[in-house]
Amino acid sequence: MSEFLPTAQVSDIAHTIQLAVAPVFLLAGIAGFLNAMAGRLGRVVDRSRQLEAEFTDREHPDHLRQVTELRILDRRMQLANLAIWLCTASAVLVCCVVGGLFFAQLADLGFARTMALGFIGAMLLLIAGLGVFLIEIRLALNSVRVRDDYLEHRIENEIERESRLP
């Protein structure tokens, strides 16, 4: 490796650092997404454990609701896990691209096309991960509904309060 160092010019290394800055910022963004996804996954796991602890017999009136919710939670865990996997794979590929940029510069190798393909692959993995994350969010929103009788109660209370105002 020491034979690589004398041939690399400081200006060449500075240029490589400039090229690597954008992917490094991308890694920070991916880390933020991973944090959000892991938080959602943790909440889903906690809710499923709580529901399992409260699980009732088949004859209980809440049994069907519990089974339905557990199935949805299980699907959400799968989706969140896949989204985390895809975004993590994207981050690993970005790290490989950054490392490859420096290796190619130090070894005076022409890996531009390989690095570009690696970055494109990382972007495709990130897009897929975010897409799966959106599906998980959509599933969560569709599975949580406020009962109509609660909504009507709130509306009635608001109308009653407004009618009392001078």
Image (tube, rainbow, N blue to C red):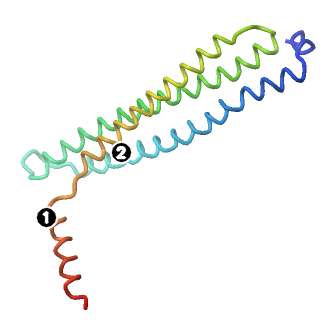
At label 1, which amino acid type do we have? Asp
| Picture disc at residue 44 | 2
Q: How many marks?
A: 2
Image location (x, y in percent) of residue 142 = 25, 45
Image location (x, y in percent) of residue 88 = 53, 29
N-term-proximal mark, 1 vs 2: 2
Name the element at disc 2: helix
Q: Residue at x 90, y 18 (%)?
A: 9
Q: From what the image shows, is residue 122 above or below residue 142?
A: above
* Residue occupied by mark 1: 149
Name the element at disc 1: helix
Q: Is residue 78 left or right of residue 69?
A: right
Q: Residue at x 22, y 53 (%)?
A: 145
Image location (x, y in percent) of residue 108 = 81, 9
Q: Residue at x 50, y 29 (%)?
A: 126
The crowding category of the residue bearing disc 1, from other C-alpha atoms within 10 Å (few below 14, some 14 to 19, many at least 20), is few
